[in-house]
């Protein structure tokens, strides 16, 4: 085990969806983007995005559930240096600080949001 993995500790939670994988660790969140959905949207709309993003929990300010009437909901993470919302739904949904889950049932996404908020609060309490 390398030094970063030792500091990060075991994975607390993971969520796989159309936006890739969202991984929660003791000290950070990792968003790993992959799959046919991201490839198709990137090719069709030329939405530039990061393939992998790591956000430290002690830098996390807020976790927002962005809702749309017709399109998929997504989580947006706010931290110092995060991209500001543009108002363009696709660009915001595929930004480096966003995670898409599903077109149908987003209850697991809401549960993951709660776990992330709890982990960030616990991290703040330790500091």
Image: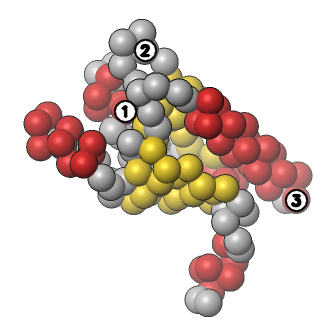
Measured along the vertical axis of the image, is residue 48 above or below residue 106? below
Residue 58: image location, x then y, percent: 69, 54
Q: Nearer the viewer, mark 3 or mark 1?
A: 1
Q: Nearer the viewer, mark 3 or mark 2?
A: 2
Contact? badges 2 and 1 (CB < 8 Å): no
Q: Which residue is mark 1?
A: 93
Residue 81: image location, x then y, percent: 47, 46
Instruction: State the separation of the CA atoms marked 3 and 1.
Output: 32 Å
Q: Quadrant of the N terminus?
A: bottom right
- Residue 37's disc is none
Q: Which residue is mark 3?
A: 126
Q: Which residue is mark 2?
A: 68
Q: Is residue 84 visible?
A: no
| Label 3 residue SS | helix
Q: Relative to residue 72, is residue 106 drawn left or right?
A: right
Residue at 74%, 48% (x, y): give it: 120
Measured along the vertical axis of the image, is residue 19 above or below residue 29? above
Disc 1 crowd, CA 10 A, few/some/many (<14, 14-19, 20+): many
């Amino acid at each position: 085990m390398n030094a970063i993995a030792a500091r990060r500790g075991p994975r607390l939670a993971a969520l796989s969806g159309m936006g890739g994988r969202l991984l929660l660790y003791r000290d950070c969140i990792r968003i790993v983007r992959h799959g046919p959905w991201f490839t198709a949207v990137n090719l069709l709309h030329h939405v530039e995005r990061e393939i992998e993003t790591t956000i430290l929990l002690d830098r996390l300010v807020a976790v927002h559930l962005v809702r749309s009437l017709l399109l998929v909901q997504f989580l947006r993470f706010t931290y110092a240096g995060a991209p500001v919302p543009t108002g363009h739904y696709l660009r915001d949904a595929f930004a480096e600080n966003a995670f898409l889950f599903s077109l149908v049932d987003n209850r697991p996404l809401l549960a993951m949001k709660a776990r992330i908020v709890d982990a960030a609060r616990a991290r703040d309490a330790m500091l």
